Amino acid sequence: MEIMEALFTRRTIRSFTGEGISRENLTDIIRAGMSAPSAHGRRPWRILTVESLEKRKALMPLCQWWQMLDKAGVAIVVCSDKSMAEDMPWEFQLNDCSAACENMLLAAHGLGLGGVWLGICESDEKIAKFKKVLEIPDNMRVIGMLAVGHPSAEPKPEERFDPKKWYSETWGRSK
Ligand SMILES: Cc1cc2nc3c(=O)[nH]c(=O)nc-3n(C[C@H](O)[C@H](O)[C@H](O)COP(=O)(O)O)c2cc1C
């Protein structure tokens, strides 16, 4: 799929067939994530893929918005290795890992798969439980998770371009 087409047609997919993802597709998705831009080239991302249905089901009670995890082919957890960017504003880790997440969603779409970004920031208690289930060590900051799988529904692309949100030369002057 051509890159501009992928950008304009990607939509969040929340219903999946339950079929697994091939190793080749999964590798391409992770590779796309690791191709993201990164502040000072630190690439702090560390990625955990969870194909086990048992483990994915164990995560579902942690958030009411994660109820598609059992039908996805894989959960992709994106963490930042805190030690990689301690001398920089912490937001850079968030920026880097978020760029990786979007790259992976676009890669999944380009491969004919679908995905949803799942936010992980409800409470320290939930994050602690999440880390415990997946045995994620303390030096990792959990940034986000994606559920990726074979779509069982096809949402329509939607035009999001809004010229009112685009200013030119000085703030408030519309393009
Ligand atoms: C940081 C972040 C957290 C999100 N968390 C969830 C979530 O927990 N569950 C969910 O179903 N969708 C989640 N989404 C997906 C958004 O709801 C979705 O991107 C939005 O509705 C726009 O739809 P689109 O992706 O099709 O453009 C999240 C998206 C982002 C960027």
Image (spheres, grey):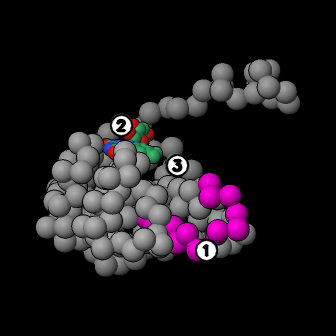
- Which element is circle 2 on? loop
- Answer yes or no: disc 1 within 8 Å of ligand 1: no
Residue 84 part of the magenta-drawn span: yes
- Which element is circle 1 on? helix
Residue in the image at 62% along x and 58% along y: 90
Left or right? Give the position of 104 relative to 52.
right
Q: Quadrant of residue 42?
A: bottom right
Amino acid type at mark 3: Leu
- Answer yes or no: disc 2 within 8 Å of ligand 1: no
| Residue 91 in view, yes or no | yes
Above or below residue 77? Residue 109 is: above
From the viewer's side, name the closer residue of 79 and 112. Answer: 79
Q: Position of residue 82 (x, y in %)?
A: 55, 69
Left or right? Give the position of 55 relative to 104.
left
Q: Please give the residue where the numbered disc 1 appears in the rendered image.
A: 84
- Bounds of the magenta segment: 78-91
Closest to the camera, between mark 3 and mark 1, is 1
Left or right? Give the position of 32 relative to 157.
right
Residues packed near mark 1 inside 10 Å, few (<14), some (14 to 19) or many (20 plus): few
From the viewer's side, name the closer residue of 107 and 129. Answer: 129
Which badge, 2 or 3, comes first in the chain's sequence?
3
Amino acid type at mark 2: Lys
Q: Position of residue 93 (x, y in %)?
A: 59, 61
Residue 23 part of the magenta-drawn span: no
The tag on residue 156 is: 2
Cα distance in 3D space between marks 1 and 2: 40 Å
Closest to the camera, between mark 1 and mark 2, is 1
Q: Please give the residue where the numbered disc 3 appears in the rendered image.
A: 7
- Which element is circle 3 on? helix
Amino acid type at mark 1: Met
Residue in the image at 27% along x and 43% along y: 65
